[in-house]
Amino acid sequence: MKKFLSVLMLLSCIVLVFAACSSSSNGNNNSSSSDSSGQSSGKSEKDEKDWTIALVPKDSTNAWFVRMEEGVKQYAKDTGINVFQKGPAKTDAAMQVQVIQDLIAQGVDALAVVPVDPAALEPVLGEAIDKGIVVVTHEGSTQQNTMYDIEAFDNKGYGAFIMDNLAKAMGEEGLYTTMVGHVTNASHNEWADAAVAWQKQKYPNMTLLEKEPRVESEDNQERSYERAKELLKKYPDLKGIMGTGSYDGPGIAKAYEELGLVGKKFTAGTGMPNEVKQYLKNDSMSTATLWDPKDAGYAMLTLATKILRGEQIENGLDLGVPGYDKMQFVEGSDKVLYGEGWIEVNKDNVDSFGF
């Protein structure tokens, strides 16, 4: 009996030692510390000079994200931290997933992502977080596998603001519809939904096109131009088209210009100053609204750095650029932060931006 108990005690000790070694080994694979709940806090144990942070835009060629990369380069210059931008060759969710997978394999410390399709990114961003990589997003308020998502402004307020501009151009009456870059894009659809809700509340003489209340431009100016022409042919009474993607407004305005409908049909929405300049000046587009993607890129990297440093993320957060210096959590959320970063672009100020 004594011999049996001795053997049993020896086996128990071996199991405990093996478990302790396994736990230690697992801990060494994760560079982030954990909070009292056991969840990764994101804080890195590495020196800042050894950090690598990658910003992943929707694509690498869109003028919007070329401008965003200026913010990435500025952040690198200001901080000395190894940050860079790498995106897919075009706006494609599967291609963006592949870029993120490659960056995970390279062992980056943080990812700042502008999702093409939040749902499509959930598995790969979940994998990144599981590996101890800090993940933050922008234009991804529905993203679950992110530590924080930052928005330049309250999305409902921005959608209402675009609608105010469209309504003014349309004389607050007539048939209209909405256009988004992709029907999977969280922010574009939130803006469009908010705009429609605001129209129903404030502009009763305007009517949403029921047969096609939401059209997709595929984040492509030529496609938005083609879709606008198709809509105008099918619905001659259509008076206005609200754009959300940066290519929507210019494409719609081009269609109005070509068809001789300037002053008869109207559009307002997000747009880059250099992309919308000619349309604002010839009145085929009434107003463009936007936030500076350079600032958004800089703010995302600042947020990722704060998490890696173990800093507390709370209301009033300052991310170092105008419009992102007093960030607030969206009511009911502990993940989505918004600032006050939108800009109105019109024919009088369009030349002042430089991008």
Image (cartoon, rainbow, N blue to C red):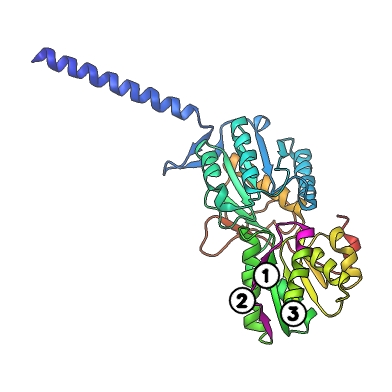
CA separation in Å, label 3 and label 1: 12 Å
Residue under pointer 3: 167
In this rendering, does residue 117 appear at all? Answer: yes
Which secondary structure, mark 2? helix
In percent of the image, x 80 and y 75: which residue is there? 266
Say which residue appears at 80% left-offset and 50% top-offset: 67
The reply to whether callout 1 and callout 2 are in contact (CB within 8 Å) is yes
Residue drawn at (73%, 43%) of the image: 89
| Earlier sequence position, callout 3 versus callout 1 | 1
The disc, 1 or 2, on the residue closer to the chain's N-terminal end is: 1
Local crowd size for mark 2, using a 10 Å CA cut-off: few (<14), some (14–19), many (≥20): some
Closer to the camera in the image, 328 or 217: 217
Q: Secondary structure at mark 1?
A: helix
- Looking at the image, do the residues carrying marks 3 and 1 touch, with CB atoms under 8 Å apart? no
Q: Is residue 265 magenta?
A: no
Residue 237 in the figure: left or right of residue 194:
right
Furthest residue in direction top, as rendered: 3
Task: Name the spot of residue 51 as percent of width and height, x first.
Answer: 65, 33
Q: Amino acid at mark 3?
A: Ala
The amino acid type of the residue labelled 2 equals Ala
* Residue pictured at 77% horizontal, 56% vertical: 292
265 relative position to 152: left or right: right
Residue underneath mark 1? 159
Which residue is label 2 attached to?
197
Horizontal and vertical percent position of residue 224: 76, 63
Q: Is residue 216 magenta?
A: yes
How far apart marks 1 and 2 lie (CA) works out to: 9 Å
In front: 242, or 296?
242
